Amino acid sequence: MRGAVAIFRRDFKKFLGNPVIIVMTLFMPIMYLIIFGNAMGGTITHIPIGVAQEEPFEDATPLFLSAVEGLGRYHTAGNPRIFDVTVFSGEATAKRAFEEGKVMAVAIFPSRVSNDHAVRLYLDSSEYMIPGLIQAGVSGVMAQSGAQNPLQVSKIYGEIDYIQFFGVGVIVMAIFMTTMMGGGIGLIRDRENGIIEGYLVTPVKRSSIILGIIASGTVKAFMAGFIIFLVDIVVAGVTIRSMETFLMVLVVLFIVSIGITSLVVSFSSRFSAQQEYASVVAFLNLVLFMTSGAFYPVLGMPDWLRWIATINPEYYAIHALRSLILRGQANLIGMDLLAIFIFSGIAIALGITTYRRTLE
Amino acid sequence: MAEMKSDRTPAQEKIIRIEHLSKVFRDGSRTVKAVDDVSFEVRKGEIFGLLGPNGAGKSTIIRILTTLLLPTSGRAFVGPYDITRQPEEIRRVIGVCPQNSTLDLELTAYDNLDFYGNLLDLDPRTLDARIRELLEMADLSDRAHAPVQTLSGGMRRKLEIVRAFIHKPLILFLDEPTIGLDPESRREVWRQVTALNREKTTIILTTHYMDEAEKLCDRIAFVDKGRLLRLDTTENLKHSLPAGDVIEIGIERVDEETLAALRAESRLTSVEVREHKLVISAENGSRVLPSIVEIFERHALPMTSIAIRSPSIEDVFIYLTGRRLDGGPGMKREGLP
């Protein structure tokens, strides 16, 4: 019995003696509650959709007017409106905005007042839940206005399952997770064990050390992402439509890999203890992954999480990969590419400067 | 083991020169003078020992000489190169075996050597042959492809020492090369160090083991609290004690009266109490022994053992500092900690 008490006291003394760990052990579940709880299952609002009336445009039909009005007001109790409706002057302009990714659906209304002309709804089916909400919204508004017109729905990227939607997010998660957990802890362990110091008494250049570390980390991260990509193809059944998109996927994986590796190199040079690093990184991983839109559309998150998403490189990386893999649209990723380029550029600069300082 | 020591007269050419070197560490508001105005020279081809207790500043001196730390003041030259201005050149001519192992435990012995061969930019055509030669030297040829974590402590040390030697450096720094090793492994490491020294490598080693310094080093620098206490050849140091012999008497207890009686004996130079023994210095040990025994008998104190020996480097150190090298209280001398 005395032994048990001794062991209990020893463990507890160590626990109390390490405030960082205490805070992190309590902090993590609370953060899970707050971030996970808010990121998942929120009401999706402000979905950008476009409406237009068929040519020849003579006059807005009553159906069109009531639909625009109805969609604009459409909401569930106690929530802001679900759709941000943009009215386009014609079908062509509406479809262009749709193709450019500015709206997630367009509804084209017939130009004649009749019950047999169909309302055509084009949906971006690569998002989770959003296509269903839009379809429900449009048919609900039409029913309210008493229109009998058939609704003709085109899912322009075909049927996309949740596993495909999610699977693309997991590619990016794999890159972030393997680098932050495996790569960073390995670097700290090397430093703790004096292996890095061993390099310093050899004539090898400081820049070579950093280059070697970042290069190996990048290749490891890239391989992790690429393997999950292959798994997605085999298990989730995603398809690659062209060589061009395939190569673009590799480019995105590479830029993200080098960025996150550099960031981790920078991070690991600031932490002396593995445990502290692991706690901080686990938290960072949670925030980045939850706000990346990998699980659930960012549109369904509260504003503060959406703000995090706008500065989250994972969000842009996932958006880019979805555009390439699920939509097959390389022209949609300009903004995402710019964002991850900026992220990686800053991360590389940060990684080199901070790591160099630890080598001095 | 005296035959292990290099018996050739070291050339007088200087390979390391240290002038008024100081290193101050700041830890918050506290400042620690790890190295305090140390000057000495190391001769080409010798085995030079930096001897001192833990925390004496030995490792700091090594870290400065191996370009890992900059001195706070003073200058140092390794070969013709200034440590503050030409660190790159110095790194090409030195081999370093740090106190804490920097071997990659998951890699094999061969791969560890290969890795350093590449870091040191060795000719890739001869690298394989060189690695095999080194493995042979360290008696590890049959374990070449075993992960380092499966090797014993002694094997790892030997591997690390040959790794530091892979580019045939002019100077080899060994920081506590046998710390934590069993006696057999220590002897193995010593054999290896002497073998490397025979290849005309200057070796600088730090240690807090007296026997090690005594067996290996041509010259020894005593360092304590950041200062250089004494630098001389190992032989000269041993002869520097005022008394000729050391008599150690095993005891279970001692009383003040006996001590007083011993100290009253004029032929004994000093009488010190250490753990379970009395250490007595005297000009001629065998002559004074009967009278010592008599004093013990008179006070009815049992002796468990008697030994007469020549003074060791440890005795010299204790004489110089009043402390044992492992930091324990050595002599009960007044005015000394």
Image (cartoon, grey):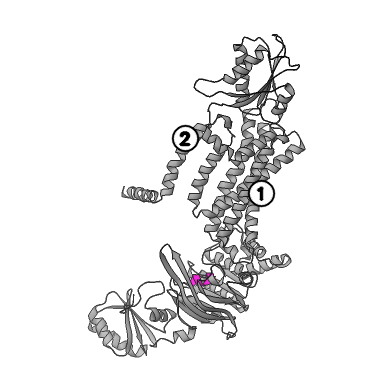
Q: Chain of mark 1?
A: A
Kind of element beneath mark 2:
helix
Q: Earlier in the sequence, mark 1 or mark 2?
A: 2
Q: Is residue B260 visible?
A: yes
Q: Chain of mark 2?
A: A
Q: CA distance from mark 1 to mark 2?
A: 34 Å
Residue A339's x, y, as percent?
Answer: 64, 42
Magenta residues span B58-63
Instruction: Report the residue at 39% width, 86% height from top.
Output: B245
Residue matched to label 2: A33
Per the rendering, the mark at residue A219 is 1
Element under disc 1:
helix
Q: Tell me the kind of residue under disc 1.
A: Val
Q: Amino acid at mark 2?
A: Leu
Q: Residue at x 60, y 17 (%)?
A: A69
* Residue A333 x %, y %: 69, 37
In the image: residue B121, left or right of residue A15: right
Q: Nearer the viewer, residue B45 or B152?
A: B45
